[in-house]
Image: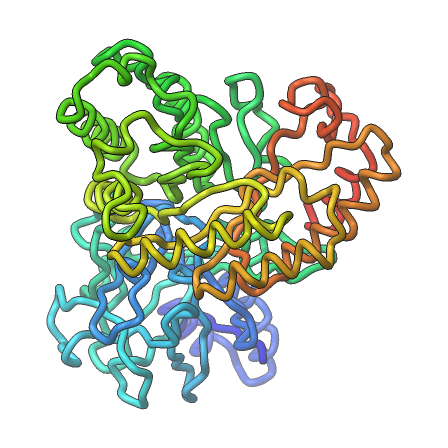
Amino acid sequence: MRRRFERWSLLTTLALIACGPAELDEADFELDEIAEGITIDTAATYTIVGVQSGKCVEVAGGSTADGAGLQIAGCNGSTRQQFRIESTGGGYYRIRNVNSNRCLDVTGASTSDGARIQQYSCWSGENQQWSFSDVSAGVARLTARHSGKSLDVYSRGTADGTAVIQWSWNGGTNQQFRVTPVGSGGSGGSGGSGGGSGGGKFVGNITTGGQVRSDLIRYWNQITPENEGKWGSVEPQRDVMNWAGMDRVRDYARQNGIPYKGHTLIWGAQQPSWLAGLPQSEQRAEVEEWIRAFCQRYPDVAIIDVVNEPPPHTTPVYMNALGGAGSSGYDWIVQAFKWARQYCPNAILLLNDYNNIEYSADNQNTINIVNRIRAAGAPIDGIGAQAHAAFSIPTSTVKGFLDRLAGTGLPVYITEYDIDLASDAQQLNVMQSQFPMFYNHPSVRGITLWGYVSGQTWLSNSGLMSSGGQMRPAMAWLMDYLGR
């Protein structure tokens, strides 16, 4: 059901006083033009984006517990940042988080300025009921029914983790929000859908030759650095940091309101060569220093490949310095995740690997690692499936392995998808078969393709368009499918 809201303002009152009965219909029409209504579809899913910060309202830490606070963070397409809006009658609505199935709630039904907004099991209390009123086109004020006070970002903050509270309406942009359907192209959405629902998943891409092309935002709504975020690229000489490439990724993402990724913290390749000659105590200190420095510089990074391509694919030279195999078999991975959570508390933390949705042994290896490190206390949030070889595997087989990863209970991110086929027709056929399966899979939270400009991808035939913008058929189909 769709409902439309309009402000009842002084202008409305004056119009009704000035008009006689015969003029009332005309006055109503004029008010529709003046106060553009916000249309709420109670069957849709929404993001709530602060006008001042450009960041999404979310449940802190993706918690599903009663009492977890609401905060702002960089939009990343996760369900912790998605809400359903349910009518309670009389122009009021409950706002239910998709991830937790709990509702926005003014703590303790307080009527005081500064009362924290939390999530709590949904009920009929007026401290869980909100009205929406227009501030300007596409921008709303959200008002708690019981207190008459407005949803507000604390102290006009813009940093990730800033609390969401209630406060008397003062017209500040920290009290104004864009309530945007997921999939409409707004922050945190999927960018539209011409053929599939997607459920708010991002569809992203990577840097091109170490640079961010200005046209990336035209086609993609998430960005990953191909090499610029790898430790070996950032610190080839001990204690001499080169953040320039990663800064370009962050700056572009912030300017365009899309999530960006850290790729990668720990890997058995493209790590600083000087690490190998250090004693284990220094190796351990350097790894922690690297993770801390990355997180301090990029506190709004949305997703991080914490460990990339674990054994048997690659093994870091400093594995034993982080605890080696230990009792879990992967204590070094557990330690890496603990540091990543400590220093990047708001990021989605992934274990990323190749062939894990293509081949049985690799699929089982990922599942085994995930189960062991979770049991040992690793704060892992999801599984990354690179999917480089998926194009050569039947879609039904890929889906079967994807379902097995989903069976761990963790969301899956398709992190490095490409289709290395010279034939336009063959590339198109694979895209039409596999992409909708990924996009509509309930456990897939986002998809990143690994390059899009022909001649500038790591595989010879995986490009999707020329440097001048001429699309191959697979790219043209994909853009149409996504409604971009």
Q: Nearer the viewer, residue 303 or 265?
A: 265
In the image, residue 229 sits, relative to residue 132, either above or below, namely above
In the image, residue 283 sits, relative to residue 28, either above or below, namely above
**Is residue 312 rendered to the left or right of residue 209?**
left
- On the image, the x and y values in percent for residue 348 come to 36, 49
In the image, residue 385 sits, relative to residue 110, either above or below, namely above
**Is residue 249 rendered to the left or right of residue 418?**
left
Q: Nearer the viewer, residue 186 or 291?
A: 291
- On the image, the x and y values in percent for residue 88 come to 41, 87
Residue 298, quarter of picture: top left
Q: Is residue 52 visible?
A: no
User: Which residue is located at x 57 percent, y 24 percent?
Assistant: 214
User: Which residue is located at x 39 percent, y 17 percent?
Assistant: 233
Residue 342, quarter of picture: top left
- On the image, the x and y values in percent for residue 58 come to 33, 59
In the image, residue 35 sits, relative to residue 26, either above or below, namely above
Q: Is residue 249 visible?
A: yes
In what quadrant of the picture does the N terminus appear?
Answer: bottom right
User: Which residue is located at x 33 percent, y 12 percent?
Assistant: 236
